[in-house]
Image (cartoon, coloured by chain):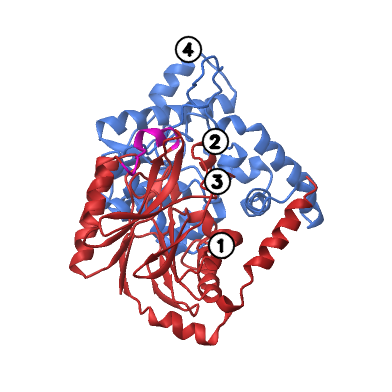
Chain colours: A blue, B red
């Protein structure tokens, strides 16, 4: 599972530059949370495009996580990239004033989609393409908000597990305190990914790597001594989140249907 | 004799743009006295074509683009990849060897991969043959990408008397490795080393670079000599024009010591294959 950081950096920085240029963009924009994934993405983008061509939006909900805002700022300053802080609380509060709820998932999803909405708006304002910051662990477990933090134009880090991103982060020079930070989706105060998922990322990634990359079966993993409950939980999460990794099905009526047999590449004629 | 390998990144679906870049490389090659310039698989069209296949297809005998490249081959031998439309209405993932202003050979990919991330047989018909043909580089045979990973295909070029084997490729990198390359690059390299050694032929592998729909074409083009020795190697992932001077005398030199060609028994293999085929159970 170990990656060669130098090679991965070379591939990912080339990918960012190449994809942007194909679509006639020279600038990239991303949401910077102060966490590991978006910091790594910002480092890659700055190395690939040059600091003046990267725009980071820091989008806290009021003063809920002041430390994260400070960390995000620190990354932006360290890289010398452009950044802007936008407080999403006025928009989110206005909505929940009309449709109140105490469901933390509903509130978290709304916030993630508010950030997405602002990113897409600024993408046009700044003529910058949106860089996705979802990793392979989240994507396989469905641990993200559909059309929220999972939305982007291109995603440089989507085929790296969380633990591999940690490895890459150290090589890129991401500040140690960010690498060591407890991962959180920031859904509510005190929330951490590992607590919510009930396992450490190290364990999750080891199981995912065996199941997905090496195509081992749950039975194989059981024999190898992995915890039965963890294997079952991960297998269930992968299955139940398939819809987050796909475009919605279209009822086929004609001979030729978008998505099924009207087939063109994303990079067509670029 | 100088060979030039163009490890480039074609524009997906834009034949005219690619043609221009082919000519730029051809001009460069001529300046360097290169006698044979080789482009990667589907170099005129890009790889992930899907439904673009029919829009970018060419008929070698009548197409004006093809005529232009033919004309350029009066001065330098040119190998490139394109989508071929045959009179039967089918489309092939093909490669052409042009020289002296003529088409010396066309190879149609016999093994278009269709599994996992690959879906070539959804869009392409399959070629049915592996040829060797005479060139200034001795008896030459062409393969396209996955053809090269088939033992049978390699054997056919060997049995056909190959001196030089040209492989055009659009191979995406796959798999982590702790080395500074994709794990999948090892697969091509080990076949290059083995086939060159056991066919006592030059093996010239030209892979592309660039990105299509997230696929990262791995580069790492190479030339192995007839003793199985690595002679030249391009970088991974990055664009490069690799030029290398080869000495054809090495072939005869190696064959003094390694008699695989003399000792090949195609008749026995053919009869054995017939027996195997006649006893298929499924």
Q: Secondary structure at mark 4?
A: helix
Residue under pointer 4:
A98
Q: Are marks 4 and 2 in contact (CB under 8 Å)?
A: no
Along the polypeptide, which appears first: circle 4 or circle 2?
Answer: 4
Q: Earlier in the sequence, mark 3 or mark 4?
A: 4
Neighbourhood count class around disc 2 (C-alpha, 10 Å): few under 14, some 14–19, many 20 upward: many
Residue pointed to by mark 1: B156
Q: Are marks 4 and 2 on the same chain?
A: yes
| In the depicted structure, whether residue A224 falls above or below residue A92 | below
Q: Nearer the viewer, mark 4 or mark 1?
A: 1
Whole-angstrom CA distance, mark 3 to mark 4, is: 36 Å
- Give me the residue at 54% from left, 35% from top: A144
Q: Which stretch is magenta?
A: B50-61
Q: Position of residue A224 (x, y in %)?
A: 78, 58
- Residue identified by numbered label 3: A136
Specify whether A73 is left or right of B172: left
Kindly identify which chain the residue marked by label 4 belongs to. A
State whether residue B176 is above or below residue B233.
above
Q: Nearer the viewer, residue B119 or A162?
A: B119
Which numbered mark, 4 or 2, is in the foreground of this view? 2
Within the image, what quadrant is residue A84 found in? top left
- Say whether mark 3 and mark 2 are on the same chain: yes
- Rounded to the nearest angstrom, the CA distance separating label 4 from label 1 is 74 Å
Residue A144 image label: 2
Say yes or no: labels 1 and 2 on the same chain: no
Residue lying at 44% horizontally and 79% vertically, measured from the top left: B251
Q: For marks 1 and 2, give the CA distance.
A: 52 Å
């Amino acid at each position: 599972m170990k990656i060669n950081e130098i090679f991965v950096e070379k591939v990912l920085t080339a990918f960012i530059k190449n994809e942007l240029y194909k679509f006639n963009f020279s600038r990239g924009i991303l949401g910077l949370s102060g966490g590991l994934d978006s910091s790594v993405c910002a480092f890659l983008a700055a190395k690939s495009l040059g600091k003046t061509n990267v725009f980071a939006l820091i989008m806290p909900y009021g003063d809920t996580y002041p430390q994260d805002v400070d960390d995000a700022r620190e990354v932006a300053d360290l890289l010398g990239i452009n950044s802007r802080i936008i407080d999403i609380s006025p928009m989110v509060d206005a909505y929940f004033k009309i449709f109140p709820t105490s469901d933390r998932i509903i509130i978290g999803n709304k916030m993630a989609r508010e950030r997405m909405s602002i990113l897409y708006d600024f993408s046009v304002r700044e003529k910058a393409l949106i860089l996705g910051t979802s990793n392979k662990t989240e994507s396989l477990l469905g641990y993200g908000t559909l059309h929220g933090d999972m939305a982007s134009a291109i995603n440089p880090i989507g085929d790296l597990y969380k633990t591999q991103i940690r490895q890459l982060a150290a090589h890129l020079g991401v500040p140690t305190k960010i690498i060591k930070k407890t991962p959180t989706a920031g859904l509510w105060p005190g929330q951490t990914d590992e607590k919510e998922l009930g396992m450490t990322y190290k364990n999750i990634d080891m199981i995912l790597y065996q199941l997905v990359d090496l195509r081992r079966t749950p039975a194989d993993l059981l024999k190898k001594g992995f915890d039965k409950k963890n294997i079952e939980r991960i297998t269930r999460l992968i299955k139940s989140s398939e819809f987050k990794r796909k475009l919605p099905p279209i009822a086929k009526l004609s001979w030729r249907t978008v998505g099924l047999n009207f087939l063109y590449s994303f990079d067509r004629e670029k | 004799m100088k060979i030039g390998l163009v490890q480039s990144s074609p524009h997906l679906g834009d034949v005219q743009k690619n043609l221009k870049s082919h000519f730029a490389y051809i001009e460069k090659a001529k300046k360097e006295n290169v006698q044979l310039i080789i482009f990667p698989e589907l170099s005129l069209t890009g790889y992930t074509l899907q439904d673009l296949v029919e829009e970018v297809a060419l008929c070698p005998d009548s197409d004006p683009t093809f005529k232009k490249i033919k004309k350029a081959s009066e001065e330098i031998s040119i190998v490139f990849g394109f989508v071929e439309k045959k009179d039967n209405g089918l489309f092939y993932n093909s490669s052409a060897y042009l020289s002296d202003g003529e088409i010396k050979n066309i190879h149609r990919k016999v093994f278009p991969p269709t599994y996992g991330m690959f879906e070539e047989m959804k869009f392409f018909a399959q070629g049915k043959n592996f040829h060797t043909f005479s060139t200034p580089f001795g008896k030459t045979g062409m393969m396209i990408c996955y053809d090269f990973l088939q033992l049978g295909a390699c054997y056919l070029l060997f049995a056909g008397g190959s001196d030089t084997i040209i492989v055009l490729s659009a191979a995406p990198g796959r798999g982590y490795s702790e080395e500074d390359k994709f794990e999948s690059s090892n697969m091509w390299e080990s076949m290059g080393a083995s086939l060159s050694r056991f066919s006592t032929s030059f093996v010239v592998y030209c892979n592309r670079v660039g990105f299509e729909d997230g696929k990262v074409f791995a580069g790492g083009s190479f030339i192995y000599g007839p003793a199985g020795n690595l002679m030249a190697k391009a970088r991974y992932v990055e664009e490069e024009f690799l030029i290398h001077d080869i000495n054809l005398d090495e072939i005869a030199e190696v064959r003094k010591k390694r008699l695989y060609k003399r000792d090949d028994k195609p008749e026995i293999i053919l009869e054995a294959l017939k027996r195997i085929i006649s006893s298929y159970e499924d």
